[in-house]
Amino acid sequence: MNTRRVSFRTVFGGPSIPPDFIEELARLRHQLRGVEFQYDFDLFVVGGDITVVTDPTGLRVPRVFLGRRTTTAQIQMNSADVMNVSDPRAFLFQTIHSAMVELIRRVAARDNNFDADDELRKIEFLVLEGLGEPQ
């Protein structure tokens, strides 16, 4: 079985985005890099000054490719949310967690051999760390 992982592509950031956001996004990417999944999760993170997002923060254009065992989605981060949040870590970790939960549910609805409970356990740390609880 091939090793499947989470990958991020980003168009996120800009001169007025607090550096904490960029640091926390890099930290999140690093932490998820070591987690093996049943599918590849290709996430495209958009927001900040580079691409201003006025829609609500959340998952957009989710897709599941059963043959390639891949999911793709765009995660838009509302620019006002980003500028006004007091805890970048919690915001990022919870946003990514919510998006991945939705993708996992979509895969489970289409792939009978997919163990959604196992995948959900693998990303549980995102909620705990977002809340500041140690692992």
Image: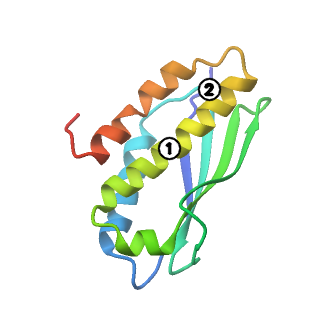
Q: Position of residue 54 (x, y in %)?
A: 58, 74
Callout 1: SS: helix
Q: Tell me which residue sits at (44%, 33%) in the image.
A: 35
Tell me which label, 1 or 2, sits earlier in the chain.
Answer: 2
To which residue does mark 2 refer? 2
Q: Position of residue 30 (x, y in %)?
A: 39, 48
Residue in the foreground of this view, choosing between 2 and 104: 104
Q: Tell me which residue sits at (68%, 14%) in the image.
A: 113
Q: Tell me which residue sits at (58%, 17%) in the image.
A: 115
Instruction: Kindly identify the amino acid type of the residue bearing the numbered disc 1.
Output: Ser
Q: Quarter of the image containing the N terminus?
A: top right
Q: Residue furthest bottom?
A: 15
To which residue does mark 1 refer? 98
- Select label 1 or label 2 by which is in front: 1
Locate residue 67 relative to residue 11 in the image: left or right. Answer: right
Q: Say if residue 28 shows up in the picture.
A: yes
- Above or below, comparing residue 14 to residue 100 in the picture: below
CA neighbours of label 2 inside 10 A, class few (<14), some (14 to 19), many (20+): few
Q: Residue furthest left?
A: 134
CA neighbours of label 1 inside 10 A, class few (<14), some (14 to 19), many (20+): some
Q: Say if residue 6 shows up in the picture.
A: no
